[in-house]
Amino acid sequence: MNETLKTIAERYSCRDFDGVMPPDGDLRAIAQAAIQAPSGTNRQHWQIIVVKNRQLLADMEAEGLKMLAAMEDPSFYQRIMSRGGKLFYNAPCMVLIAVKEAQPKGAELIDLGIVAQNVALAATSLGIANVHCGLVSLAFAGEKAPEFKKRLQFPEGYECGMGVLLGYAKTTKAPHEPNPEKITWIE
């Protein structure tokens, strides 16, 4: 198995970080992998924001939990609280991907997914645990959204796409078991 396929097979979603910050050189390599992602018509409607500021991450997490607690259905909030009450799982770093709407509308979401997967695979290849984090969008769902956009230096017209949390695993687990029934062959 080549190194790329091995990295894909070994990657898992870490939800238990030890809080240790990865080295800047590795974070720069991960950010570089993010901007090497292809995009439709090479529009690159993204901005990669590497967030190492722990206070900012804590503020975003607190706002996200507040928004989650206010939802009509309390089950998701209760699930997060039963897992330790952390949206960001003690990760010391996040690659936040801000996106700008593309045409046709929604095309930016395809590009967003490609960028996020580049980040996750690059991190895994460097021995850095990671997890895709759509929950970061909760921090941008309320009245603090403009403040967070300013603190994160969002370009004009950009919105929160998603984050990828980075750090070292406190505990590890095996990747999910692939289901071969999810493949259909048409010959």
Image (cartoon, grey):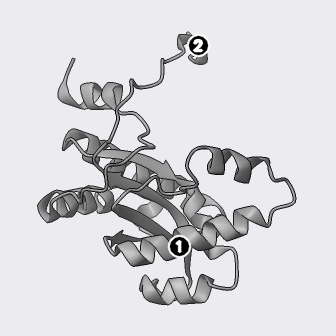
Residue on which disc 2 sits: 186
Please identify the residue farthest to the left as the structure is shown.
Answer: 25
Q: Secondary structure at mark 1?
A: helix
Q: Position of residue 68 (x, y in %)?
A: 71, 62
- Which residue was labeled with disc 1? 60
Q: Residue 136 appears at what percent x and percent y?
A: 55, 63
Of 73 and 113, nearer the camera is 73
* Amino acid at the residue labelled 2: Ile
Residue positioned 71% across, 53% down in the render: 77
Image vertical order of residue 110 relative to residue 147, above or below: above
Q: In the rendered image of this protein, does residue 119 appear above or below residue 99?
A: above
Side of 48 where 28 appears, left or right: left
For the point 21% across and 57% down, the residue is 22
Q: Is residue 12 or residue 31 the one in the foreground?
A: 12
Q: Position of residue 35 (x, y in %)?
A: 31, 63
Location of residue 19 in the rendering, given as x and y in whole percent from the top left corner:
31, 56
Could you tell whether 170 is left or right of 137 in the image? left
Q: Residue furthest right?
A: 72
Distance of label 2 from label 1 (alpha carbons): 46 Å
* Three-letter amino acid code of the residue under disc 1: Met
